Image (spheres, rainbow, N blue to C red):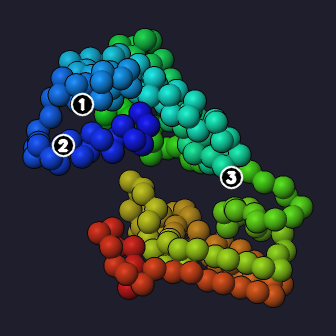
Amino acid sequence: MNTDLAGKMIQSIEDNNFVYLTPKDLNELSNNIEINLVLFSNWKNNPELAIENCKSLILRIKEKLTENKNSNLLNLEQLFRFNEIFNELQRLNDKDGYIKDIKTLLVFFKELMSNESLDFQGEPLHGLQIMGMLETRVLDFENVIIASVNEGFLPSGKSNNSFIPYDVKIEYGLPTYKEKDAIYAYHFYHLLQRSKNIHILYNTEVDALNGGEK
């Protein structure tokens, strides 16, 4: 859907004071373009149809972004990850058949999304390097920017999920959050030790997830 057509659809909706639009109304406003079949089709609580529609939408977005590939490398990588997730959902459903409805599909989708990560790749000898704290442990940098240096993030504090109580760990000499914090403290000190320009960023606003500085 091009921007001109989208603008005309928005203008028509505003002019006619439409509040609720059915898929039929949208098709009429957009001259029945094929993309509407993907965006607004009724999945009828069918997870297979939902997966196919999402994969089709990803493919269409990819085709559009590929026209200017160099400017959309990050977006294309994100689309690839989304496509991998829907491929995995399709494999799970074909193999075990546990996904019976859209609600169950959403549960599996959220679980796969929570474990997904986006890798940044670049030239290791120059330019900006994006990495985790542990990846810096044997490297020295002249310029360092550390983000999310908030309480509960760095160090993470008492965030280890475990069924073993803290006192039991102490009694039997098992590692606790203190050992983890000590490791990160060492890497943090080593990272700053030989750096010349250091920028430490943290959030001062408390959000819904208590992400701000305490």
Q: Using residue 212 as the reference point, say whether residue 81 is left or right of it.
A: right
Q: Using residue 180 as the reference point, say whether residue 164 is left or right of it.
A: left
Mark 2 against mark 3, which lies toward the viewer? 2
Q: Earlier in the sequence, mark 1 or mark 2?
A: 2
Q: Secondary structure beneath disc 1?
A: helix
Q: Earlier in the sequence, mark 2 or mark 3?
A: 2
The kind of residue tagged 3 is: Phe
**Above or below: residue 20 compared with residue 102:** below
Identify the residue at horizontal 34%, vertical 79% (top origin).
206
Tag 3 residue:
120
Q: Marks 2/3: CA distance?
A: 41 Å
Identify the residue at horizontal 15%, vertical 34% (top origin).
21
Identify the residue at horizontal 81%, vertical 65% (top origin).
127
CB-based contact (under 8 Å), mark 2 and mark 3: no
Question: How far across and how far down the image is residue 29, in percent?
Answer: 24, 30
Q: Using residue 155 as the reference point, say whether residue 98 is left or right of it.
A: left
Q: Which mark is residue 13?
A: 2
In the rendered image, the quadrant that contains the C terminus is bottom left
**Above or below: residue 125 compared with residue 41:** below
Residue 137 visible in this rendered orientation of the protein: yes
Tag 1 residue:
29
Question: How many labels were placed on the picture?
Answer: 3
CB-based contact (under 8 Å), mark 1 and mark 2: yes
In the rendered image, the quadrant that contains the N terminus is top left
Question: How far across and how far down the image is residue 121, in percent?
Answer: 74, 51
Residue found farthest to the bottom: 196
Residue 40 location, quadrant: top left
Question: How far across and how far down the image is residue 97, in percent?
Answer: 35, 13
CB-based contact (under 8 Å), mark 3 and mark 1: no
Q: Marks 3/1: CA distance?
A: 41 Å
Identify the residue at horizontal 25%, vertical 25% (top origin).
27
